[in-house]
Image (tube, grey):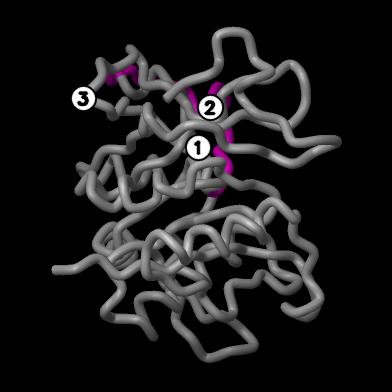
Amino acid sequence: MTPKLVIATPVRAADMLAASVSYGYAQMLTRIHRVVPCEVLDGSITFAADIVRGRNRIAAQVLREHPDVTHVLWVDDDQWIEDVAVVPELLALGVDVVGVPYTNKRPPLRWVHQPLTPPAPMEGDLLPVAGVGFGFTLTSARALRELSARAVIYTDHPHAHRVANIFGHMYYHPAQDAGARVPEENMALLSEDYSFCLRWRRAGGKVYVYAKGGIVHHAGPHAWSAREMPGGVIG
């Protein structure tokens, strides 16, 4: 099957056309269209909703209205990748959840992805990890569909759409990767993207970062990237 890609970006605005996005993000979309057939998902917007419901809403819309889509590229409105040729490379990897490594956007800089405990070895150009941020991450529609079938379903009021809670916050401790029993009070409450990844791993899937992804910029006071983190430049 030829991959069919949509790009999904949650934005925060009372009206989608009034949403603010970084100029780097806007330029990147134009460049992606030149290297791979894709469309930007219309209505990928959180409105006044939180990011959990925003991402749940996007996943449900893809599965409900775009049955021929094979992959979703999740890109945040404050991020952009230097080399958009990475997008068809990600599609060609044949994995269900893979992100391009990027940093946070304030010092001290750190990678956003979470390592496994103990750390996993490389699988070619892919590093298995516990979780990736969804600032620049590709998921298969298969993964969205499989997790949705396992998830709690709710109504996306004021709309009548049924939505699967695949991004809802989960509790977690890295020692659980090694099979340890951890008291609830010692666990962290994961962000929505890490929670998605934990669900996918518990469903038997793997989460990867692509070591040849190159540089992703993360807009804060300026465009932060791995170039400003000692030892951080990869790919």
Q: Amino acid at mark 1?
A: Tyr
- Crowd around label 2: few <14 · some 14–19 · many ≥20 (10 Å): some
The quadrant in which the N terminus is found is bottom left
Q: Which residue was labeled with disc 3?
A: 124
Judging by the rendered image, the residue that carries numbered circle 1 is 171
Dot 3 surroundings within 10 Å: few (below 14), some, or many (20 or more)?
few
Q: CA distance from mark 3 to mark 1?
A: 31 Å
- Residue type at the position of mark 3: Gly
Name the one closer to the observer, 121 or 197. 121
Residue occupying the far front of the picture? 34
Q: Secondary structure beneath disc 1? A: strand
Foreground: disc 3 or disc 2: 3
Q: Residue furthest top?
A: 230
Q: CA distance from mark 3 to mark 2?
A: 32 Å
Image coordinates for residue 60, horizontal then vertical, percent: 43, 74
Amino acid, disc 2: Met
Residue 97 place in picture, x, y as percent? 33, 46
Q: Residue at x 58, y 42 (%)?
A: 191
Q: Residue furthest right?
A: 221
What span is in magenta?
178-192
Cβ atoms under marks 3 and 2 closer than 8 Å: no
Q: Is residue 182 above or below residue 87?
A: above
Q: Residue at x 74, y 36 (%)?
A: 223
Look at the image and tell me in which quarter the C terminus lies. top left
Labelled disc at residue 187:
2
Gap between marks 1 and 2 measured at Cα: 6 Å
Q: Earlier in the sequence, mark 3 or mark 1?
A: 3
For the residue pair 66 and 163, the one nearer the viewer reads as 66
Horizontal placement of 68 versus 52: left or right?
A: left
Q: Residue at x 48, y 59 (%)?
A: 32
